[in-house]
Image: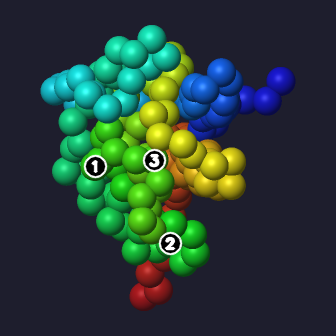
Amino acid sequence: MAKLIGCEISFIRSKGNQILKIRVLPEIEALFKEESENISKNYKDATGNGLDYYDLSPKLSKYVQQYNSRLLIGKRITLDRYGGDLILDGYYNYSILRTVKISEGIELNIAGLILDEEIEPYYRSLANLTKYIYQNFIEPREIKATMTIEV
């Protein structure tokens, strides 16, 4: 069985509802965790309850700016528009990663119509982003260097 190193994502359209299911590693949620939590008026679960979310830390805001400046192709990302459309003009809104208990799995009821051709690149890009976060911030690493000085 493959090891989860980023996230599991599925999109379900059934009986007039559109549901985005996401689960990330607890270590990824921990990067987004802040002391302060809010309840979304726009992002709701399958039963209509607003999702709890963490405030965005300045550290993560800075990281997003750096990530976007290195991005050569594809849409840029934003984490600061919790409750906004998933796909914005030129941006993918990944603020959903700030949802409390996303590591246990969440379901987001998407209110507006979203096309398959829009959601597929969105969740592929989200999977790549969470994999990048895992590999660059969570995965254990040891970097060694040796310096020699000739006299």
- Residue 126: in sight, yes or no? yes
Assign a secondary structure to mark 3: loop
Q: Position of residue 146 (x, y in %)?
A: 51, 67
| Position in image of residue 26 (x %, y %) | 48, 24
Q: Is residue 41 left or right of residue 109?
A: left
Pick whichever of labels 2 and 3 is earlier in the sequence.
Answer: 2
Q: How many marks?
A: 3
Q: What kind of residue is marked 2?
A: Leu
| Residues under numbered marks 1 and 2 in contact, where contact means CB atoms less than 8 Å apart | no
Q: Amino acid at mark 3?
A: Leu
**Residue reaching furthest right?**
1
Residue depicted at x 27% and y 28%: 40
At x 58%, y 26%, the residue is: 17
Q: In the rendering, at what x and y percent does residue 74 appear?
A: 57, 69
Discs 1/2, front: 1
**Above or below: residue 38 compared with residue 60:** above
**Which quarter of the figure has residue 6?**
top right
Classify 10 Å Cα crowding around label 2: few (below 14), some (14-19), many (20 and above): few
Left or right relative to 89: residue 19: right
Query: Which x, y percent locates residue 89?
Result: 42, 65
The residue identified by callout 2 is 71
Q: Quadrant of the C terminus?
A: bottom left
User: What is the three-letter code of the residue carrying label 1?
Assistant: Asp
Q: Which residue is mark 1?
A: 80
Residue 78 vertical placement versus 44 (above, below):
below
Q: Disc 2 or disc 3, which is closer to the eye?
A: 3
Residue marked by disc 3? 86
